Image: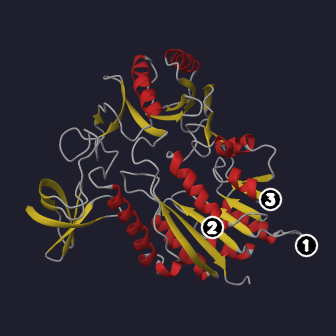
């Protein structure tokens, strides 16, 4: 059925939200203040619709920058909010974090020291890395349509940096002409080095013949410095020089360099990531302190922590990310531990030798599933301050509640927009130990 709806807000999943006869309706590509005609399906209290016509545009609506964005035709599924202004997007992301804090964490955002959200330095051309699919017939690296596996022949992705977009265009035809058939292609670009790297996910462990084809690919694409070939159940194979170096703070070489590889997690928005690191360290106050870092990854926070703290112990599951961090930060006052972050935190709390200096600070940046059990671990460590960096408001709220039940108080909460044009958001929370004077 078709209904006229007034859109009130943007939902945490990216769709616009309207109400009719006491029921909630989610409609993609709508913005707060819009009056729309939507084709609605479903029953009960929650409905889902598709935009048929924009009757009256809201004040926060704007024309999208990309020709592939929107509800009709061959539309890319990568972006959700190009039709909404950056101010509207930022407000929606703040509401997502605040809503999760109330509903899941049972915490009052204002009592938790809520701070205004921080915008990304760039709304477009901010991604230095992204995942694609190979459309062999067209010889392109493409995205899929929203909610489908149909390739979209993207002419120009406005989220990618100029270097990454150039690499995408060059690698697609070369990869299409090769006999390599990756199920997924991840690209990364370093503005500092002016070169890129690729991760090709294959269906089986790479053969000697495939390695030879990968070397031919490097020769065919001069801006491609290296490749990582991987398949489930086998170790990655490195071809060429896939480890890239980036400025930790773009435009400030004095802040140092960080290493990355396209098959290892890194933040895609390097400019906003520098702000995220700055916020986390300013809240933590690590100067002269002993810091335990959990889920250190390849060292995004570890290097800046080591420059300010008296000592850093960094924990990550054994693998390429930890190997990269160790190599990148060799010589710094950092002790690396490999293993499960929370189990090691509890072990370090239990096994502290008499007279040994305790950790006074903790910083954790867990994956999307969060750090269930972090409350008791922080309590056992007796740290004075802890900073929790999260990419998921729901798991953040769950874990903050566990921390408050373990004797900590949430003293500051800051959202940072690393993903303009999408609903995704990062958040940083400061926890203080109520049992420490």
Q: In the rendering, at what x and y percent does residue 298 appear?
A: 65, 46
Q: In this rendering, which labeled residue sits more in front, label 3 or label 1?
A: 3
Q: In the rendering, at what x and y percent does residue 259 appear?
A: 65, 39
Q: Is residue 107 visible in this depiction of the protein?
A: no
Q: In the rendering, at what x and y percent does residue 41 appear?
A: 15, 61
- Closer to the N terminus: mark 2 or mark 3? 2
- Closer to the N terminus: mark 3 or mark 1? 3
**Residue with the mark numbered 1:** 354
Q: CA distance from mark 2 to mark 1?
A: 30 Å
In the depicted structure, whether residue 90 falls above or below residue 326: below
Q: CA distance from mark 2 to mark 3?
A: 18 Å
**Residue with the mark numbered 3:** 311
Mark 2 Cα shell of 10 Å, populated few (<14), some (14-19), many (≥20): some
Q: In the rendering, at what x and y percent does residue 396 appear?
A: 51, 68
Judging from the image, the colouring scheme is secondary structure
Q: Nearer the viewer, residue 238 or 282?
A: 282
Where the N terminus falls, by quadrant?
Answer: bottom left
């Amino acid at each position: 059925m078709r209904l006229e709806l007034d859109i009130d807000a943007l939902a945490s999943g990216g769709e616009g939200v309207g109400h009719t006869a006491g029921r909630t309706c989610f409609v993609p590509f709508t913005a707060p203040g819009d009056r729309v005609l939507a084709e609605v399906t479903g029953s009960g209290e929650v409905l889902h619709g598709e935009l048929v016509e924009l009757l009256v545009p809201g004040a926060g609506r704007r024309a999208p920058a990309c020709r592939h964005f929107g509800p009709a035709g061959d539309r890319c599924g990568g972006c959700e909010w190009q039709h909404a202004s950056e101010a509207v997007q930022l407000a929606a992301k703040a509401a997502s974090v605040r809503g999760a804090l109330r509903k899941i964490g049972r915490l009052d955002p204002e009592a938790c020291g809520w701070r205004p959200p921080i915008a990304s330095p760039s709304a477009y051309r901010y991604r230095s890395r992204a995942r694609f699919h190979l459309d062999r017939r067209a010889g392109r690296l493409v995205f899929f349509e929203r909610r489908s596996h149909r390739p979209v022949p993207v002419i120009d992705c406005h989220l990618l940096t100029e270097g990454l977009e150039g690499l995408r265009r060059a690698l697609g035809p070369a990869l299409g002409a090769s006999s390599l058939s990756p199920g997924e292609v991840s690209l990364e670009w370093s503005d500092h080095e002016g070169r890129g790297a690729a991760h090709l996910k294959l269906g089986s462990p790479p053969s000697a013949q495939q390695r030879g084809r990968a070397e031919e690919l490097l020769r065919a694409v001069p801006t491609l410095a290296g490749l990582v070939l991987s398949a489930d159940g086998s170790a990655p194979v490195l071809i060429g020089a896939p480890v890239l170096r980036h400025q930790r703070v773009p435009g400030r070489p004095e802040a140092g360099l960080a290493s990355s590889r396209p098959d290892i997690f890194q933040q895609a928005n390097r400019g906003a990531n520098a702000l995220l690191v700055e916020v986390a360290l300013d809240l933590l106050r690590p100067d002269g302190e002993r810091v335990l870092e959990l889920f250190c990854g390849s060292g995004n926070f570890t290097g800046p922590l080591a420059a300010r703290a008296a000592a850093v112990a960094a924990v990550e599951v054994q693998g390429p990310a930890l190997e990269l961090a160790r190599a990148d930060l060799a010589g710094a006052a950092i002790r690396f531990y490999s293993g499960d972050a929370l189990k090691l935190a509890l072990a370090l709390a239990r096994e502290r030798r008499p007279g040994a200096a305790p950790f006074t600070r903790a910083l954790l940046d867990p994956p999307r599933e969060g750090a269930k059990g972090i409350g008791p671990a922080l309590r056992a460590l007796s740290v004075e301050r802890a900073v929790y960096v999260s990419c998921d408001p729901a798991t953040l709220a769950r874990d903050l509640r566990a921390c408050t039940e373990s004797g900590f108080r949430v003293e500051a909460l800051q959202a940072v927009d690393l993903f303009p044009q999408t609903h995704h958001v990062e958040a940083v929370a400061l926890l203080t130990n109520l049992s420490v004077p």
